[in-house]
Amino acid sequence: MLVERVLFNGSIYTGAHTPRVSALAISGGRIVATGSDEAMLALAGALTQRDNLNGRYVLPGLTDAHLHFEWLSRALQAVDLYEVPSRAEAVRRIAARADQTPPEGWITGRGWAQDLWADGAFPTAADLDGVTGAKPAYFSAKSGHAAWVNSAALRRCGITAGTPDPEGGHIVRDAAGQPTGLLLETAMTLVAQHIPAPTPEHLADMMAQAQSLMLAAGLTGFHDYDDPSCLKALQVLRERGQLKLRVVKQINQRWLEHALETGIRWCFGDDWLRFGGLKLFADGALGPRTALMVEPYEGEPDNYGMVVVSKEEMLPLVSRASAAGLPSTIHAIGDKAVRHVLDVYATVRQEEAARGIAPAQRRHRLEHVQLIHPDDTRRLAELQVIASMQPIHATSDMERATKYWGERCRLGYNARLQIDQGVTVAFGSDAPVEPFEPLLGIHAAVARRRRDGAPGVEGWYPELRLTMTEALAGFTTGAAYAAGMEDRLGQLRPGYLADLIVVDRDLLQVLPDAIPGTQILATMTGGEWRYGDMPGA
């Protein structure tokens, strides 16, 4: 056996039946053996690279099962409004960028959340016009389900009092019927489609920068939910030999017909870049209070949220995709949206059974599952639907969730419920809605509190806390199963891809509050060091 690299003198958590070993051997980008230092070094030849871990801790590489790579890569170049504490601070940052923007350019940014501001009110174009002038400006909310634009952008895009709401969206208007500068859900596209897009080559440059940060955070792969422009740039990155993360690319609704015409099926591609399933939106989000609810929002008796794609529209789309070899992956945050998606999946599962298609052949996913109704708690398990969740949403949203959902939050952000029923759970971040750092997601899952200690030592609904092994599984084996790669990804065992991270402490032994401070010392994908202080990294 030709062994290209041996890692030894470490504490390696394999995630497999033999959970700890001290060494492993790699060849051809895969792990060929695991075991003791003596046994692995005995496999080494004259040309074998020997990497002494010096007692460090190794984990399987972490996969973010839900993020927006193009949006993230572009956001890193835009005005950062994430967690800004006031409208005034947001406007100050926007003003600074406006001064640097040429007259014909757009001012863009992302991350604002009105719930963090003293008055809790949504922003308007009037807040922007004094600092942006005639330069059009567009700023997406932290949730990604609302946009704040200035009057110049409204004029540029022809949005007036007479512009109708698009299906699945809403142009917020004042008492006189004039647009305020706030766009919800699909209404965002009325402006976003006019913002000049970068070329695939320029976007690939942005992605290379984002990829470096993600490797430094311990990520070795991700599942993407952006448009085909993201796929184009990913292919440019691959052609350049710069793609170092493993990517599953989902197919948004608008491009389903193209996918069906070309015959693309789930998992088409290779271990670096492959297709996932059909992506749909059932509803909005909690931040702008557009998540679709069975009962109204607390204090808003007439607000039940918004339908983005109705159950009646979803069913034929999911059915056609399944018949063509594609599972679906559907955004649902409110409890009524979750119910609608499960109703659709129940019908499609019957169709699949009639064709002799097993659930494992159509790995349907429910994205976010932020709130589930008591009547629906067992349905993901019954239908064998993957729960794709983002633990960090719980700690980020806990105040607004409590405010708008009240006691219903006991069934909110509840991976514990799904795991206890045997549901496969895949974890992610929804970046750039939240930071893409998986250790922050792991901390949120096991502690149910923020880094600053809020809401207290027990955490928010402490009975929903996960164990460290459960949290790690969400970012490793769960994500691998959702990608159709569970036979070669998510564990460190012979035959599996050599994707791993080196950390400065034993995450399976530390107290939860030590997790966010963990240092990623090195990251490997495909048997090569891509980040860190190991040889060749």
Image: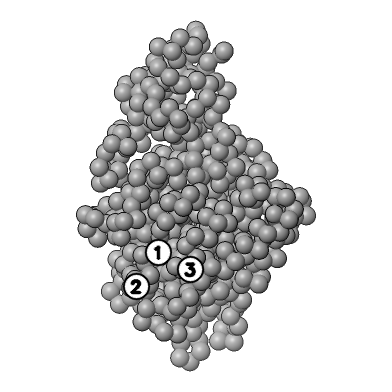
* Disc number lying in front (1 or 3): 3
| In the image, farthest residue toward the bottom | 176
Q: Seen in the image, is 463 located left or right of residue 497? A: left
Residue appearing at x 34%, y 45% in the figure: 467
> Image quarter for residue 17?
top left
The residue at which mark 3 appears reads as 375
The residue under label 1 is 411
* Amino acid on which disc 3 is placed: Asp
Q: Is residue 471 left or right of residue 43?
A: left
Helix, strand or loop status at disc 1? helix
Q: Quick check: marks 3 and 2 in contact, CB under 8 Å? A: no
Secondary structure of the residue carrying numbered label 2 = helix
Residue at which label 2 appears: 406
Q: Residue at x 77, y 51 (%)?
A: 262
Q: Earlier in the sequence, mark 1 or mark 3?
A: 3
The residue most toward the left is: 457
Rate crowding at label 1 as few (under 14), some (14 to 19) or many (20 or more) other CA atoms within 10 Å: many
CA–CA distance between discs 1 and 3? 11 Å
Q: Estimate the spatial distance between the alpha carbons at disc 1 and disc 2, rounded to whole Å.
A: 11 Å
Asked whether residue 229 appears in the rendered view, the answer is no
Tell which of 418 and 296 is nearer to you.
Answer: 418
Q: Which is nearer the N-term, disc 1 or disc 2? A: 2
On screen, residue 125 above or below 523: below
Image spot of residue 111 (x, y percent): 41, 62
Q: Considering only order in the chain, which callout, 2 or 3, is on the residue closer to the N terminus?
A: 3
- The correct choice, above or below, for 379 with respect to 188 in the image is above
Q: Amino acid at mark 2?
A: Gly
Residue farthest toward the top in the current orientation of the protein: 46
184 vs 59: above or below: below
